[in-house]
Image (cartoon, helix red, strand yellow):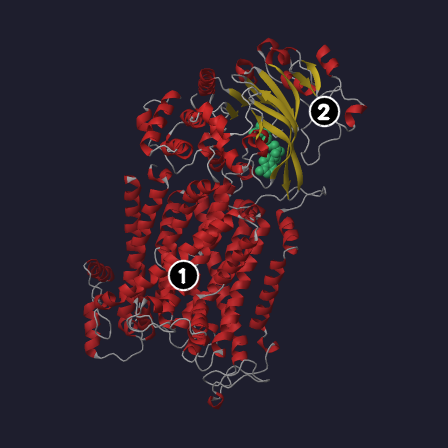
Amino acid sequence: MFRYIVRRLLQMVLTFFGATFFVYALMFANQDDPIQALAGERPITESVRQALTERYHLDDPFLLQYWYYMKGMLTGDFGTSLTGRKISDMMEVAWPVTIKLGLIAIVIAAAVAVTSGVIAGIRRGSIFDNVTLVITLIILSLPIVVLAPLAQLIFGIKLGWFPPTAGATPTFWALLLPALVLGSLVIATELRVTRSSVAENLRSDYVRTARAKGLSRKRVIGVHVLRNSLIPVVTLIGVDIGGLMSGAIVTERIFNVPGVGFNLFRGIRTEDGPLVVGFVSILVIVFLVVNLLVDLLYAALDPRIRYE
Amino acid sequence: MSESITAAAGPSGAPMMEPKHADKRDKPRSLAGDAWVDLRRNKIFWFAATLVVLILAMAVFPKLFTSADPRDCILARQHGGASGSALFGYDFQGCDVYARTIYGARASIEVGVLATLLSGIIGLLFGLATGYFGGWIDAVLSRFIDIILGIPFLLAAIVLAKRFSSDSNSNGVVAVTITLGILGWTTAARIMRSSVISAKNQDYVAAARMLGAGPGRLMLRHILPNSIASFIVVLTILLGANIASEATLSFLGIGLKGDAISWGIAISDAGSYVRVAPAPLIWPSVFLAATVLAFIMLGDAVRDAFDPKLR
Amino acid sequence: MTDIKAKIDVLPGLDPRAPLLEVNDLHVEFRTQYGISRAVNGANFTLAPGETLAILGESGCGKSVTAQAIMGILDSPPGFITKGEVKYRGVDLLKLPEKERRKVRANQIAMIFQDALSALNPVFTVGYQLAELFRVHRGMSRGDAKKRSIELLDQVKIPAARARIGDYPHQFSGGMRQRVMIAMALALDPEVLIADEPTTALDVTVQAQIMGLLAELQQQRNMGLILITHDMGVVADVADRISVMYAGKVVEEAGVYDIYARPAHPYAKALLESIPRLDMKGQQLNVIKGLPPALTAIPQGCAFNPRCAYAQDVCRQDPAPPSYIVAPGRTSRCHFWRDVVGE
Ligand SMILES: Nc1ncnc2c1ncn2[C@@H]1O[C@H](COP(=O)(O)OP(=O)(O)OP(=O)(O)O)[C@@H](O)[C@H]1O
Ligand SMILES: [Mg+2]
């Protein structure tokens, strides 16, 4: 276990530096005028130019610039947006909303996906299985830019079941529709993986043993099969978080949820380079940390990895 | 990232093919022949293929479907209702929604196909190299893939697209294509890599190697033909994903721009007016979803045909 | 053995004087998309307490499927028992409701499998998998169940049982894993143990140890043992009687000495002649020519006729040869068993 953790940590450190370097280099390296890139097409006053140069150490060699950027991030200094607000302050307001949204999405998606996936896996070829297959196919083929506005139009505006937009301090109820939209991003894959994993495990020898032990079907599936089947599903969570982050940008913008994605969207639209770099960097870090945690969880679930 | 879809079906990502059940006729048949027989009987395949052909036709010959000019916009017609000449009505700038939706296919297909080709080439080369040579090349490239996958897809795309689209005169096709192409190859590379590794250990490849076949010849003659099916499946599904990503980037304002006609832009623009005019939102959405669906179904059908085990 | 009384109460119609296990005319088929595969077409045998019955036959002849049908753990669908009886002490298990049937498993009839690594659940400790039996069937507390599990591991001679109870299957060696399987099968003192190729996955020295352990435990408990195996050496050592299966049928059943000395079915004879023996040094081995039939298209008449040196026209026509009684407790499904034995 210890060696596994150490290895994963080393791997994460490498990925961390690689990923941040990638982000940073793309924003700054080899640009004719990095400042113009940061500020987009807006006219730049001399004082802004100076502030940005100083802020990003643009007069220094590139590696040094990167070093300063990393140092800032590791000490919690993510910079200031072009509108003059500190990124960390913006984050402080935005995170709780996004986390709430994400949690609702994940919980609902996981509950639905695992339950239906298990049923579909047990009754392969049944009507239920075929219906879920078709539904997942449809969900898979609905990009978030289609799903979010259509859901808003149908359930928010036409039917009026949910508030069409969330507003400044969204309630659970206001977040539910965006969370469902967000959750649908991951639900189809989770369901399909659960299904095939359950189906595969049901055919395995240890299930035969469990039945030979005179265990009830409920116990064979609920304890023996489920525990094994969830291992691949758990590994999906890491990937899913990335998908949720991406989806949150679109979803939060459409439902006016004042979260991280919404801010990032505004940053992109207003060409606020510092804001985008700051937010993206933070999200990348969060993503890596979550993936590390998922790997540890994976090891906890699968003893073959734990004791390798 | 998009890997999960394929992972769901093929746990190992290895060339998941096995000859189909023994045929009663004596004539030996190739795997591809078998797969084709299977595909021909598959209704989903025909449905998806028809849809794909239709969309391709729209992209290449939009005039077949509409005689209206998508750029002929008259503000006086703003949000005008549907009529015989404008099936889906007009949007907020008074453009013909139907015409713009038809013409939108071109951008999607163009970006989707080009980006997928780019990903395919990169994935193929990386996969072959890592699988065949193994060792440190494999280690380095695997870490490289880790790094790419260490950034959530859309975030990476945002950064890349921003970088490539600094030229404000272009309509963004090149920038989006390169962005998606650079980010999309990892699954293809992994599939290729594991195919090569398992093929490498097969007796007939070992035999060919002992007979003095060089790496280039080995890959071309012996390894590629065996892995090509799963590779194509991955690319087909990726094509659908790329089309969705193009729309998403365009929606965010860092994809296609300027005077480009794109479903993503249309959805983004229509969003502000859904309460008054839902049609300009609905139709591009439907076309976009149908296109993605078609490619996913096509990929699924082909995979099933090559890999009967996974049903 | 204090549980015997409880067992009788559980199963209605249980007759302590009836044979321990009796399989009559068992038929199993698999309904697959490529047709119906008749894996078992009339399996018959009986088993007495303390007795070891070996089931022999080529790969794919339905040995494992028979065992699974007895246990009631066939994959269904595609597998279906279409005919026959499986009687435990006079009770036809096939007619029992699933809930009753479940209690018979592990309590009265237990099974061990060929590949212990895949037969044990990889994500639970062996302690958990053993204790589970006591907790589910006996309602024991965790603590008691654990104590019993340690005792069991001691009985199957796993060193440092107390320490190893928290280990996972992959942390054991092949032989130790098979011991764990045996412990699991014996946990609830079953009267019948079915061992499906228990030693095939092990190397030779370990094989001998495991067989020794099985024999010892069988004697201690006076268990009936059904041993499915390919290993003729093992059969000669431990079996009392032998059932030879071909294409889903028991073609000959006989005491081990009888069958080795004078087989009464051409297939049994061919099978025995295909074993290398020390006294045959220098002679050529007889390998049975041809292949076993596809179970989707079993030949008319005697299924063995295309490969049989004794085959005549009657062998190629339905009905298939009945079960001739060669001697008391000895049967053969060959029209010409007299010729075969007589040689
Ligand atoms: N789940 C199943 N689905 C379809 N057919 C099956 C299934 N299980 C077994 N069979 C068929 O039943 C036949 C008998 O199989 P079985 O496992 O009993 O053979 P066996 O005598 O145990 O062989 P071996 O010595 O190789 O273990 C095989 O031909 C097999 O194809
Ligand atoms: Mg078997």
Q: Which residue is mark 2?
A: C307
Judging depth in this view, the residue of C313 and A131 nearest the camera is A131
Q: Looking at numbered disc 1 in the image, what kind of residue is underneath it?
A: Gly
Q: Is residue C248 visible?
A: yes
- Determine crowd level at label 2: few under 14, some 14-19, many 20+ residues with C-alpha closer than 10 A: some
SS at circle 2: helix
Q: Which residue is mark 1?
A: A183
Which of the 4 image quadrants contains residue C343?
A: top right
Question: Residue visible at 71% across and 32% down?
Answer: C298
Is residue C278 rendered to the left or right of residue A3?
right
| Count of all numbered marks drawn on residues in the image | 2
Q: Which quarter of the rendered image does ligand 1 occupy?
A: top right
Q: Which chain does tag 2 point to?
A: C
Which of the 4 image quadrants contains residue A99?
A: bottom left
Vertical comparison of A137 with C179: above or below: below
SS at circle 1: helix
Q: Is residue B11 visible?
A: no
Q: Looking at numbered disc 2 in the image, what kind of residue is underneath it?
A: Arg
Is residue C274 rendered to the left or right of residue B94?
right
Residue B246 image position (x, y, % from top left): 45, 68
Residue B135 image position (x, y, % from top left): 39, 42
Residue C26 image position (x, y, % from top left): 64, 29
